[in-house]
Image (cartoon, rainbow, N blue to C red):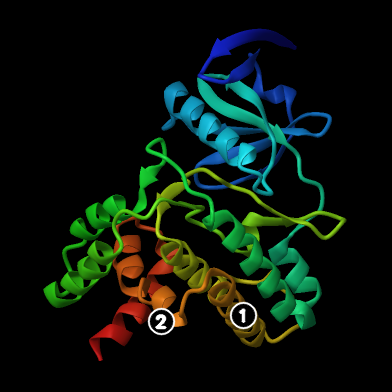
Amino acid sequence: MCVAAAVATGCVWHAFLVTEISDFRRIDGGRCADIFEFDVGRVLKLYDHRFSAEWVGQAAERAQLIVDAGVCVPGIFGIESVGGRFGVVMERIDGETLWERVAQRPGDAAALGADLARLHVEINSIEVGESFVDALGLMAERIAQVSFVEADLVGRAISVIESRSGDRNLLHGDLHPGNVMVRPSGELVAIDWDFPRRGPASHDACRAFHLIGSWALAPGTNCDVIAVRRAMATSYIDVYGDAADLGIDDIVSWTLPHAIARFSEGIEEERSELYQQLAEYQL
């Protein structure tokens, strides 16, 4: 089924050249990639046709740098080509997402928010180099693509960006309860490192804070969803601020630039929340 072949990517990799994706069972997926069972204790994250072999190789190298830094993330085993698509073979994390854990134990929302904050501070405390995209440069480019926002708001957003340029912290970019696994031991593992960046920690914390406050629990969950979100988000930002020595105002100052930049990505289910955030600045 597989033929092993060595590939040179700057690290020691092995590519297992598979010809048929039907050899594997799909277990999950999102906007960028599908996840397949691959081998005992491993999965294949197979990106769609928009992502080249070069991009996937670079993504795997960045993922290995994050592993080597000691962050609680899945291990990396190699790269893979299947039917013209490219992907990364990585450790399978047994357990449930933090999203699922909160839905099952809504009374633990505040404690789990605190656990998430401590994991996030650990991630953001790591400094990274030029192989990681500059988050603020990318944010400024995306803000420039949004034409309907008032010039005054755009200017205020750019001022926030310019005040913090040069920071080199490791940023996840999309850390929320659905992108964190809880092992049976209780250890949290950050997953979905498709677009890690470098920039100020407060930038990443603000994004996570708003995601925690707006994500949807599973249909039929028997709890007050708004109360659970509030408890988890409040605990998260309080613990993150204390652990990272950041004021809450430092973190939420990124709300405006985040909201404008996210409009450029065209994610329809986020638009209502983004409009609400903009409206708060227009009052």
In the drawing, what numbered circle is on residue 78? Answer: none
**Residue 225 drawn above or below residue 203:** below
**Residue 181 drawn above or below residue 62:** below
Q: Which circle's residue, 2 or 1, is located before the other in the chain?
A: 1
Q: On the rendered structure, is 264 left or right of 247?
A: left
Q: Secondary structure at mark 1?
A: helix
Instruction: Estimate the spatial distance between the alpha carbons at disc 2 and disc 1, rounded to whole Å.
Output: 20 Å
Q: Residue at x 21, y 66 (%)?
A: 158
Q: Where is residue 109 drawn, in percent x and y? A: 72, 78
In the rendered view of the protein, which quadrant contains the N terminus? Answer: top right
**Residue 132 drawn above or below residue 106:** above
Q: How many marks?
A: 2
Out of 34 and 197, give the one closest to the viewer: 197
Out of 243 and 195, give the one closest to the viewer: 243
Out of 181 and 252, give the one closest to the viewer: 252
Q: Where is residue 93 drawn, in percent x and y? A: 76, 45
- Residue 77: which quarter of the image? top right
Amino acid residing under circle 1: Arg
